[in-house]
Amino acid sequence: MVKVLPASRSSHVDVRVENASRYLKRCYVVERQLMRTVAAKFVDTSQWDFKRQLANDMWQASRHADALRTRILELRYPRRDVDKKPDPALMALVAECAKGTAHAEFIGGVYGVLLPELVRAYQGYLSATDPLDDAPSIYIVRHIVADLEMQIERMRALADEVSPGLFERTAAWQGYLRQCCAAVGGISGLDERAPAPADHPLAGRPTYEIGRSVMRDERWRPVLFHLPHENKYDVEGRKAWQRIEALDKRVAMQVWSAISHFNEIWAAEVVAASMWDFDDQPWDFYLDLARWAWDETRHSTMGYRALQGWGWDVPDLIPWGNALYNALGPMPPIQRLALLYYYEDSLLRAGTKQIEIKILESAQDDGSVQDMDFDWADEAIHVSYGYTWLRHLLGDSNAGKEELTRLTDDAREIIARFVAEHKDDPQAKLAPYFERLHDVIASMLHDIPDDALNVQWAPVAADEEALKA
Ligand SMILES: [Fe+2]
Ligand SMILES: [Fe+2]
């Protein structure tokens, strides 16, 4: 016999650090893989309202995964194996969700099944752990649950608005995914496991692959470029644009910055596609790229908000190009990232943002000034992301730097060839847009005192020859 005191508490939840970290790691694996999947489906989704929400939720998933990952590292300190050996059954579950067609099945499956299953797992965690011993986890998990509930609610409201009946139409797909969840014992892994639905009519689809070309929302007419600066062959488009410039350089900047921002969606698509294409990078790579892709979607939304703010019928008046992403389609993922980094870095080096802000201030367009100011803050971070991760991918040596230059130069060649190959395509001609837009703008102008603004400005364009012309 030995002697002990009575137990300090008569009841306690039966949780230990090892169980807690194992549970949270399952949630981490799902959030992380869901983030990469939503990033890819964001690229594949053309419907603009869904696309924006997917980008937002993808970024939130990156924050959830990061918080969970940090907590798991704390719980096992100094063990560092959080990113090793993700549960293959959970990876397979998210891979099944990815097989839902864009956008209806995918959205129905994620927001109708996977996210509610995640919420259930988190709530299971909250009810099973100790509020004192495991308080840091509880803080994180409660916030994640609040985010996920909001995501589900917003997506359901959005579907009611733009695609009524989406969740009802995809009921069969959701039913299949529910069975897939049950087969892994739920995301917690603690439920009794049901048999895998291998004979289900929706089982056995081929592995999902991200699209190498994008389409724009069907409300817009298909068009390759968004400003004539992107296409040196579009002489008529340039003339139509110059008529807008002739109204006032402030007016031209107001319109130019809104259209350019709106069209930054291609940058979001390049970055989001990289999150899918690179599947074995350090966690911070995905965390940074998630933010980058979400920022570019926000910049695009800034432009959309400004264009709508002028009361314009945006799909009718504003070109929303697809060429920048599509021309990059055949390139290896690293080359697309290199080209984007080149553009963003050139913009910041040229001090373009400061000049643009000066002109917008002179126009007394405070909303556009604010958008550009925050855009500038974001862009400075993106350049550091590009620098860090391209150096990581290519190696921090002279050979790596040379390879980056070669990739960028080749990419610019490919873009120039794409522009030349499409020069006679009616979708490459912007004059009809800017002629219509000129008249709309001209009818809205009003006078303000002349502040004698004396600033030279030229846009950074994909094709430098287009600028010279
Ligand atoms: Fe941007
Ligand atoms: Fe950027």
Image (cartoon, grey):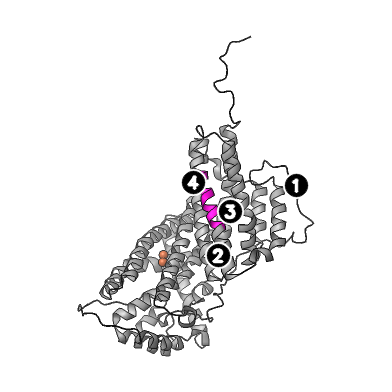
Q: Which residues make up the magenta segment?
A: 140-152
Check contact, mark 4 vs mark 1: CB within 8 A.
no
Secondary element type, mark 4: helix
Q: Which residue is mark 3?
A: 33
The mark that comes first in sequence, 1 or 3, is 3
* C-alpha gap between disc 2 and disc 1: 31 Å
Check contact, mark 2 vs mark 3: CB within 8 A.
no
Q: Which residue is mark 2?
A: 42
Residue flagged by tag 2: what amino acid is it? Phe
Depicted 203 relative to depicted 64: above or below: below
The mark that comes first in sequence, 4 or 1, is 4
Residue flagged by tag 1: what amino acid is it? Ala
Secondary element type, mark 2: helix
* C-alpha gap between disc 2 and disc 4: 23 Å
* C-alpha gap between disc 4 and disc 1: 31 Å
- Ligand 1 is found in which quarter of the picture? bottom left
Q: Residue at x 67, y 40 (%)?
A: 190
| Residue depth check, mark 2 versus mark 1: number of the one nearer the observer | 1
Residue 424 coordinates in the image, percent (x, y): 51, 88
Check contact, mark 2 vs mark 1: CB within 8 A.
no
Query: Is 85 placed left or right of 341 in the picture?
Result: right
Q: Which residue is mark 1?
A: 194
Category of crowding for the residue at label 3, using alpha-carbon neighbours closer than 10 angstroms: few (below 14), some (14–19), many (at least 20): many
Secondary element type, mark 1: loop
Query: Is 463 placed left or right of 190 in the picture?
Result: left
Viewer-nearest residue: 225 or 81:
225
